[in-house]
Amino acid sequence: MLVAASGTGGHVFPAIAVAECLSDYQIEWLGVPDRLESQLIAGRYPVHTVAAEGFQKRGLDSLRVGFKLIASIWQARRLLQRGRFQGVFTTGGYIAAPAVLAARSLGLPVILHESNALPGKVTRFLGPWCSAVAVGFEEAATYLPRTKAIHTGTPVRSQFQVGTSHVFDLPIPNDAPLIVVIGGSQGAVGVNRLVRQCASAWFDAGCWVVHLTGENDPDAKSLQHPQYLALPFYNNMAGLLQRADLAISRSGAGTLTELAITHTPSLLIPYPHAAEDHQTYNAAVFTKVGAAKLFQQADLTPDVLNAEVLSLLSRGHTHTHPSLTLQTMAQQAGSLAVPDSAEQLAQLVRHWLAPGRSVKR
């Protein structure tokens, strides 16, 4: 099987989770040079790259992207012809376009997984060409009228598997309310500033803050306090979110899936420049069931954020005795979780990549 997944953790981590469920398959990977997959996949699976780019270009740049797409389809087609591939699994994004088109031109099945509530352009355009389209949110099917979408949820990293024991190794008192701030794999400078402006009031209320700043915030070390831990990233996210009383987060599909699996209440601040504002659509799914509260970054002031956090972490709240509102939000977050998503997708792959299918030479 060829896996086509590239770019952000939201694309790569779900693909890894599915690949791990298919240990009896020979798997190779299709990506783009110098992206996240080059760090995460090297040593696990053979990696092939094509020079694909996103489609949000105009003028002469759009012509260049078009030529790159044609070249990358040809490269992917040659790769599929040289190997003994029985099909392709992709998690969408621009790497999916050459993979889908090359595979279908050779008569090979393609299983596409779309994690966002608003499917990306590639999914909307090429979904009808695929053998099966799986969606992370049921709402995504609304935007795929020509595709029979199958709701499987979105796979999470193996550390989030239900029943896995997590050792939480940060020096935070067991009973202290913990706020976790997550900016996504690239960080979120705007959110980081807001949090630092509010933090002193949260410290006064007895809260601790673990702030995942990302690696692109020039002021990441500007706040120092005994109840504040600023980290560019943290490997044990499952343990951290299980310990958290409240998350303040962007609303990428991968992060939301992890919040659902760990039953973590959240205040969601969608990334304002996300393609087609898809993070707002993701956040709306959580707010609709009462698992989270949604705030647009342009409208959010330190006073508003501070008041919301202190209201949720009301007087008398401790980690072992959470407020009723946070308990309800946690339960509703859990209602959106699909713990066996990776296994469901693996079964879908097995169905379509049946023995005996062969590539056209």
Image (spheres, rainbow, N blue to C red):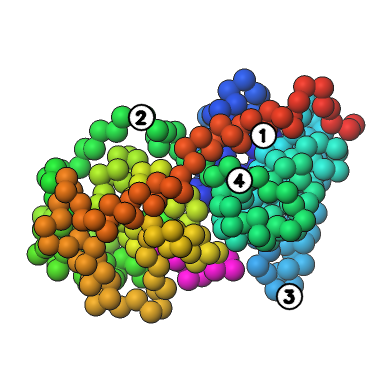
Tell me which numbered mark, 1 or 4, is placed earlier along the sequence. Answer: 4
First in residue order: circle 2 vs circle 1: 2
- Residue pictured at 70% horizontal, 73% vertical: 58
Q: CA distance from mark 2 to mark 4?
A: 24 Å
Q: What span is in magenta?
A: 268-277
Residue picked out by circle 3: 59
Name the front one of labels 1 and 4. 4
Can see residue 41?
A: no
Residue 331 rendering spot, x and y as whole percentages: 35, 49
Counting residues from the start of the chain, the first of labels 3 and 4 encountered is 3
Residue 151: numbered disc: 4
Task: Note whether 242 is above or below 307 in the view shown.
Answer: above
Residue type indicated by callout 1:
Leu
Give residue 164's mark. 2
Q: Earlier in the sequence, mark 3 or mark 1?
A: 3
Instruction: Quickly name the residue at label 1.
Output: 348
What is the x, y in percent for residue 34? 55, 48
The residue depicted at 67 percent of the width and 34 percent of the height is 348
Residue 76 picture quarter: top right
